[in-house]
Amino acid sequence: MHEMSLAEGMREIVVEQAQRHGFSHVRILRVEIGRFAGVEKRRLGVLFRCGDAW
């Protein structure tokens, strides 16, 4: 599941950057996915939201 690894990688980057800049949480994350990326946008969104419990 390609989207799962993308969601996990995005989460790691967001958490790392938030900590680096002294943020306690992130409310909005804007992601642009190219037409030929081979990513199911809906699945990625669902997986990333499920990661709220991470």
Image: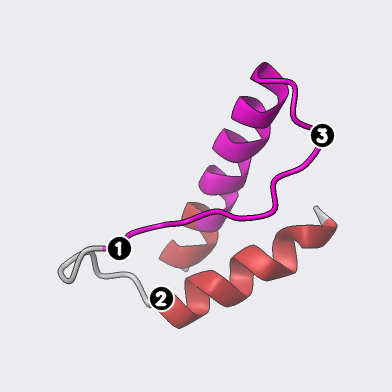
Q: Are marks 2 and 3 in contact (CB under 8 Å)?
A: no
Q: Check residue 48 for magenta coloring.
A: no
Q: Which mark is residue 41?
A: 2
Q: CA distance from mark 1 to mark 3?
A: 26 Å
Is tag 2's residue or tag 1's residue first in the polypeptide sequence? Answer: 1
Residue at the (66%, 20%) spot, across then down = 21
Residue at the (18%, 71%) spot, across then down = 35
Mark 1 belongs to which amino acid?
Answer: Ile
Mark 2 belongs to which amino acid?
Answer: Lys
Residue 13, percent from left and from top: 55, 35
Q: Which residue is mark 3?
A: 24
> Badge 2 local density, few (<14 within 10 Å), some, or many (20+)?
some
Q: Check residue 30 for magenta coloring.
A: yes
Which residues lie in the magenta part?
A: 7-33
Residue 12, percent from left and from top: 61, 38
The residue positioned farthest toward the bottom in the image shown? 42
